[in-house]
Image (cartoon, grey):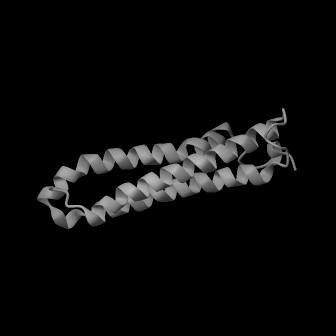
Amino acid sequence: MSVSAGRIGRSPVAVWFAVTGGIGAWFVHLTFVASVVRLLCDYPGWTWVLHVATALTAAVTLVAMAMSAALVRESRDPEDADTPGAQLRFLGLLGLLVGAINLALILLEGSYAIFLDPCA
């Protein structure tokens, strides 16, 4: 089966979301957490907002990783072949690696809400 026949491989936007979606989700998570941490010092009952932000951005990263995995499954060409399918397979593998790293970063940042005092 050729990748060009796959659903994700047909859309350049979907391919690039699969590769870079985790980076965007991590950036949003980092920015949001940094912007509300001072507010949480004054209103400690709102800590659940950090947990929701962590869950939402982790979900976006998992969706991007699932799309990357679909790119890998759709192609039967090895990554070193000079075909569009091989290029999409490489991008899918890259998306899985980038997504795993960004998921770890999101979950690590989210764990601060559990273990650390925001006012310290």
Q: Is residue 71 left or right of residue 109?
A: right
The part of the image, by quadrant, that contains residue 62 is bottom right
In the rendered image, residue 107, in percent from the top left (x then y), is placed at 42, 59
Q: Is residue 53 something one can see in this rendering?
A: no
The part of the image, by quadrant, that contains residue 83 is top right
In the rendered image, residue 94, in percent from the top left (x then y), is placed at 64, 43
Image quadrant occupied by the C terminus: bottom left
Q: Is residue 25 left or right of residue 98?
A: left
In the rendered image, residue 68, in percent from the top left (x then y), is placed at 66, 50
* Residue at the top extreme of this rendering: 82
Q: Nearer the viewer, residue 94 or 1?
A: 94
The part of the image, by quadrant, that contains residue 85 is top right
Q: Nearer the viewer, residue 29 or 102?
A: 102
Above or below 33: residue 87: above
Q: Is residue 105 left or right of residue 66?
A: left
* Residue at the left extreme of this rendering: 42
In the rendered image, residue 97, in percent from the top left (x then y), is placed at 60, 48
In the image, what residue occupies the spot 62% across and 46% down?
Answer: 95
Q: How many marks?
A: 0
Q: Is residue 38 something one can see in this rendering?
A: yes
In the image, what residue occupies the spot 68% across and 54% down?
Answer: 69
In the image, what residue occupies the spot 17% across and 64% down?
Answer: 44
In the image, what residue occupies the spot 35% across and 62% down?
Answer: 111
Q: Nearer the viewer, residue 2 or 77?
A: 77
